[in-house]
Amino acid sequence: MEPYEQIIVRVATAADAPYAPQITDEMAHSAQARGTGIARRSPEYVAQKMEEGKSVIAITSSGRWVGFCYIETWTHGQFVANSGLVVQPDFRGLGVATAIKKRIFQLSREKYPDAKIFGLTTGLAVMKINSELGYEPVTYSELTQDTAFWNGCRSCVNYPILESKNFRNCLCTSMLFDPAWVAEKEEEASAVIVHH
């Protein structure tokens, strides 16, 4: 990266569709390099998320693609997943993943204020970011039971493990943010103030 280049993190649009093949290639390459599974997505699927305003992209001021993440909804919008977080190797360690995760979380709350937001990850960095955003580790039973979600795991190298465990656990850690927790904490805080 050139020293004067700025990284812009924003909601992706249909105009960003030309980046989709690079994004899906890097998703697959990163998963392979880590030896972890990832649900494979097509460039067309990623482009659709851009067109729907359900993704966040990071690009340099000169227009180079840096990172990406998208929103998926499950169980009629009761659950939201922030999926496919990827940052190009040249830009790792600069806080880009954190900035993308924060923006996609904010976008998810704006679009689906009552939805539970969840994620599956094997990455420690993602777990730390999720914790900072208010996610908590949960069992798989707390996640959507939508079969379409679990079918998305079929391209993962660990799918046979997931299937053998009847979709109750796998190598990924499941994390959940429930907006009801925020309401409960606010209620508890106001109760404390009232009862000096």
Image (cartoon, grey):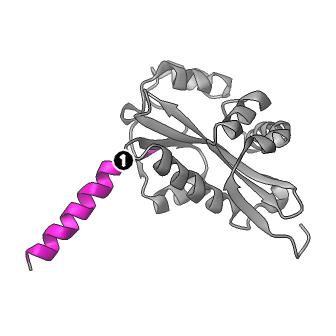
Q: Which residue lies most toward the left here?
A: 195
Instruction: Give residue 102's quadrant in the image.
Output: bottom right
Q: What span is colored magenta in the figure?
A: 173-195
* In this rendering, position of residue 109 left or right of residue 151: left
As drawn, 89 above or below 116: below
* In this rendering, position of residue 69 left or right of residue 3: left
Q: Is residue 76 visible?
A: yes
As drawn, 99 above or below 163: below
User: Principal SS element in the magenta part?
Assistant: helix
Residue 23 x/y as whole percent: 79, 42
Residue 190 colored magenta? yes
Q: Residues within 10 Å of mark 1 (few under 14, many from 20)?
A: some
Residue at point 53%, 59% (across, down): 128
Circle 1 SS class: loop
Residue nearest the observer in this picture, 151 or 76? 76
Residue 17 colored magenta? no
- Name the quadrant of the C terminus: bottom left
Residue at point 48%, 29% (across, down): 74
**Residue at numbered disc 1:** 178
Residue nearest the observer in this picture, 170 or 105? 105
Residue nearest the observer in this picture, 28 or 74? 74
Residue nearest the observer in this picture, 61 or 105? 61
